[in-house]
Image (cartoon, coloured by chain):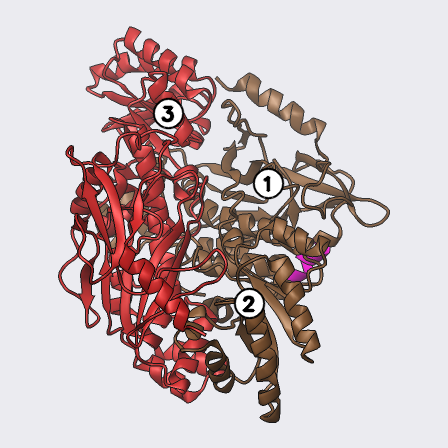
Chain colours: A brown, B red
Amino acid sequence: MEPGPSALLTDLYQLNMVQAYLESGQTGTAVFEFFVRKLPAQRAFLMAAGLEQVLDLLETLRFSPDELDWLERSGRFGAGLIDYLAKFRFSGEVHAMPEGTVFFANEPILRVTAPLPEAQLVETRLINVLHFQSLIASKAARMVQLAPGKLLVDFGLRRAHGSEAGPMVARASYIAGFAGSATVLAEKLFGIPAFGTMAHSFIQSFDSEAAAFEAFARARPKDLVLLIDTYDTEAAARKVVALARNLRTQGIKIRGVRIDSGDLVALSKSVRRILDDGGLAGTTIFVSGGIEEESLAAFAREGAPVDGIGIGTSLATSSDVPALDCAYKLQEYAGLPRRKRSAGKATWPGRKQVWRRYDADGRMASDVLSIEEDVHEGEPLIRLMMQDGRRIGPCPSLQEVRGRARRELERLPRGFEVLKPRQSYPVRVAESLEKLAATVDATTK
Amino acid sequence: MEPGPSALLTDLYQLNMVQAYLESGQTGTAVFEFFVRKLPAQRAFLMAAGLEQVLDLLETLRFSPDELDWLERSGRFGAGLIDYLAKFRFSGEVHAMPEGTVFFANEPILRVTAPLPEAQLVETRLINVLHFQSLIASKAARMVQLAPGKLLVDFGLRRAHGSEAGPMVARASYIAGFAGSATVLAEKLFGIPAFGTMAHSFIQSFDSEAAAFEAFARARPKDLVLLIDTYDTEAAARKVVALARNLRTQGIKIRGVRIDSGDLVALSKSVRRILDDGGLAGTTIFVSGGIEEESLAAFAREGAPVDGIGIGTSLATSSDVPALDCAYKLQEYAGLPRRKRSAGKATWPGRKQVWRRYDADGRMASDVLSIEEDVHEGEPLIRLMMQDGRRIGPCPSLQEVRGRARRELERLPRGFEVLKPRQSYPVRVAESLEKLAATVDATTK
């Protein structure tokens, strides 16, 4: 694990709040839950990711002497707050859905139970981590569904929003079923297989494309993939066929070609023919460049002979839905359930559980959102993950999380594997929770 | 400056390329330019930002012993590459438009001139930095134009994509004219004023809203802003009026109220009336919650009495355009201009300059994109920034960059200050450049 970012990566109002809580004695036990208010129109389900990084954050969040000194010198805070931050250790509990779990609107995927100032102080970064990875895992899961049997690779680091986003895109998309990432650091940090081919600049730096191919083949004879769209894709495919004959005598095999522009369906077909006719039936076709879900659906519909697909911008920014309408809200304080009633932003009070029922085929049938003490039919999805500020056990490996995600996608209801599912998934609010909300409303002034 | 991220924050193919360049002797001088291929439909202009962080990157990029060891153990690379990376220091030149400059499609905002392996190796992170800050500055500039005289504050850290995106959103939006950010770290790193009010959870943790307001006022009597939308916004505004009378005797003044949900135009008007009628004409109204450009246009059109506006998701993710179609392309190698001719991705070859003409009112009139040696009428926008791997002088202060951005927005052509400008800005390609492209095409096989 790389060292976490500065403890000052937070909103100023969190520090204001903590100071006010301390001064007004509001230090009782608080329960916050993180959930998505509403599914975007483009998503029929979401996938939870980022829990491991949230637990890392809670275990390691500390204010350094330099940060404390800077806060003190800002003149905004009293000595009480600085002292509190100097000693800060998260001491609470975390309940959550395991990473890779499919979830829906209003279902908490994480609950923090801790003294109010602690639960408040971690809000900003907790949302920053959990929102982003869940956003990307949800986007990637859709892409995996639309490209069955294809090798999908994250190419998103360039357009990812800043340094941390890159490896986090690699992680979240790998969880959802991508084969790997172009981001080298993601292999070092998380063991995610790194993929890479060649750049247009390599081709351009030679006076002829054929000379560039040959030089690259000699320099990197293993796992050789040639980029063929710099000038004229079909002409380049014919150069690949010619080169393959020369290379064969030297024991070098062209594993694949990559096409990064143009009509990828048409070009993959014509290039496949050129390669097959040239005796290169075993040479794979990898495509990239502006790939969206619609492109993946088109590849499947039109039988484009592509073996692998590199996806950058649309994955790394979740371009059709670059943010989820999510929140981390106080649901209970000092033993009493609470709720916010703001227009369009009302929340369900109290500690909650999500119960998932499966049909006879083992597919998800419906969920119930209940208060924690209820027992309903099905599988309870929210589990204890951290107690007294420490994980209750090691996090599952990324392979295990990936396995869970794969099973989750297999268990989605029929009809959820297409680009625009017609139905929405049924989530029922338990009677006990409806009653609790009414009681809370009646007692809040 | 915080330490930069790992040198392994790059695409695997950059390392493959460098190895192949070294082995095939392609180590001559390369010229790469960074530009946006096409303006998104939602943007009539863009604003350059991120140059300072690019120069930081180029001055400080080093491979640590741990990273070199990891690369070696991966088994992917020869000793020659590892040795090259161990000694890596960027030694090239950078020409660029200053931060805060308005730019258009196909205009390079940055040029790197360096030995080919060096210029290639820095590509991924250079794009990652320059794309994101320019994306956000461009989004923020639109918002600033649509809210003349309003205090705009970045509230985006929670939905920003990862840890680095938060402070970079603060920086890019501050350049474009935002007043500050909620992100504490942005004040520490860049001196950007931090803003903060209070949270719904504070209100909810008390049994009554009035008690919460009073406790908060006592804990933070300076710069007091009360959040009034937790339950019923107008009722809360009346509680504020009542509280103000009590607080006045203690010398505490309520500086403002914040509304975070509901119909912000209607609520700001009714709350303004309640405050004015209650003798609080000096108490400001701050709004937040799902603000988009359309909201800002509506505030102006309908005369909403809002003084300040907090903008989160739409700013931090540039939600309508979460990525620009940009590229960092080889334009010259070993003294010869180069270009890529891929469908939809063709580039203009050679080292280029952008010349900007102004009309009699001092407003931007038109640009010419030319080869570097040409001289055209107007102001040349691209300047030398780094030589032999070192800045030629200190970067301008953030205040200076902000001043430039403000003047740039003032000098945009008339009609560019609205939500959807009708015209597009004229950028002409000089004859010399057209000729060069034709010559390059005729000589590339």
Q: Position of residue A6 (x, y in %)?
A: 34, 54
- Residue occupied by mark 3: B297
State the residue at coordinates (54%, 85%): A221
State the residue at coordinates (39%, 60%): B347
Q: Position of residue B276 (x, y in %)?
A: 28, 9
Q: Give the Cα separation between the discs numbered 1 and 2.
A: 49 Å
Q: Amino acid at mark 3?
A: Ala
* Label disc, if present, on residue A22 of the rendered structure: none
Position of B150 relative to A115 (above/below): above
**Is B279 in the magenta?**
no
* Label disc, if present, on residue A108 of the rendered structure: 1
Which residue is more in the foreground, B210 or B49? B49
Q: Amino acid at mark 2?
A: Thr
- Residue A185 in sight here: yes
- Residue occupied by mark 2: A233
Q: Give the Cα separation between the discs numbered 1 and 3.
A: 35 Å
Q: Nearer the viewer, mark 1 or mark 3?
A: 3
Location of residue B334 by image quarter: bottom left
Please give left or right for residue A252 compared with residue B333 in the image.
right
Q: Which residues are magenta?
A: A402-408
Chain letter of the residue beneath label 3 in the structure image:
B
Q: Give the Cα separation between the discs numbered 3 and 2.
A: 46 Å
Which residue is more in the foreground, B240 or B56? B56
- Residue A391 in sight here: no
Q: Amino acid at mark 1?
A: Pro
Q: Nearer the viewer, mark 3 or mark 2?
A: 2
How would you rate the neighbour count of disc 1 (Cα within 10 Å): few for under 14, some for 14-19, many for 20 or more? many
Chain letter of the residue beneath label 2 in the structure image:
A
For numbered disc 3, what is the local secondary structure? helix
Chain letter of the residue beneath label 1 in the structure image:
A
Q: Nearer the viewer, mark 1 or mark 2?
A: 2
